[in-house]
Image (spheres, rainbow, N blue to C red):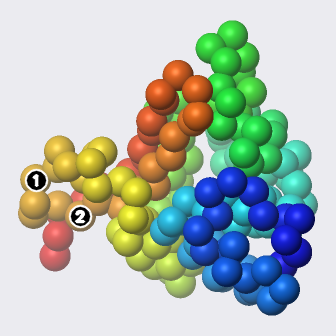
Amino acid sequence: MNKDDIVAYSPILEKYVGKDITLKALIEASMTYSDNTANNKIIKEIGGIKKVKQRLKELGDKVTNPVRYEIELNYYSPKSKKDTSTPAAFGKTLNKLIANGKLSKENKKFLLDLMLNNKSGDTLIKDGVPKDYKVADKSGQAITYASRNDVAFVYPKG
């Protein structure tokens, strides 16, 4: 990890300057702590933003529009469609990944475990769901317009 790779809000990866880090650890940092540098590294590792967009389209998501890397993507403009999605599009994609077999059992468990342990979503969807349900979520926010978001897979405990 190079010092020049580190962007704002990278609480995990800032500790890895001068060290190697696995893809699994990058995913854990991104999903659990919203580490921005981890997000960038993952996207680059899988082929860049165009590859992410292509994969989303393969999953049937023609709405989500990834364009920029962190932290630039956090500067939202209501007049732009850059780096946007809708609750319906994101929910459908998440459902395909988790409930409709688009991930192996091992990867599904890995994703759900990460989302169940998300450290940044406790006051969002999790806060409004009955305690006898599990909430696997991933939250985020933009720097402009005080926007906050959360996507979750909610299911009964047990």
Q: Which residue is mark 2?
A: 134
Is 16 placed above or below 11 here? below
Amino acid type for the residue under numbered disc 1: Pro
Q: Closer to the camera, 132 or 23?
A: 23
Residue 35: quadrant of the picture: bottom right
Left or right of 76 in this view: 131: left
Q: Which numbered disc covers residue 5?
A: none
Tag 2 secondary structure:
strand
Residue 8: quadrant of the picture: bottom right
Q: Is residue 125 visible?
A: yes
Q: Closer to the camera, 14 or 39?
A: 14
Q: Closer to the camera, 94 or 48?
A: 48
Is 45 placed above or below 48 here? below
* Residue 23 position in % (x across, y down): 73, 80
Left or right of 126 in this view: 19: right
Residue placed at 76% from the left, 39% from the top? Answer: 72
* Residue 143 position in % (x across, y down): 58, 34
Q: Which residue is mark 1?
A: 130
Left or right of 153 in this view: 139: right
Q: Quadrant of the N terminus?
A: bottom right
* Residue 19 position in % (x across, y down): 80, 89
Residue placed at 51% from the left, 40% from the top? Answer: 141
* Residue 131 position in % (x across, y down): 10, 60
Q: Residues within 10 Å of mark 1 (few under 14, many from 20)?
A: few
Tag 1 secondary structure:
loop
Q: Are marks 2 and 1 in contact (CB under 8 Å)?
A: no
Q: Quadrant of the C terminus?
A: bottom left
Amino acid type for the residue under numbered disc 2: Lys
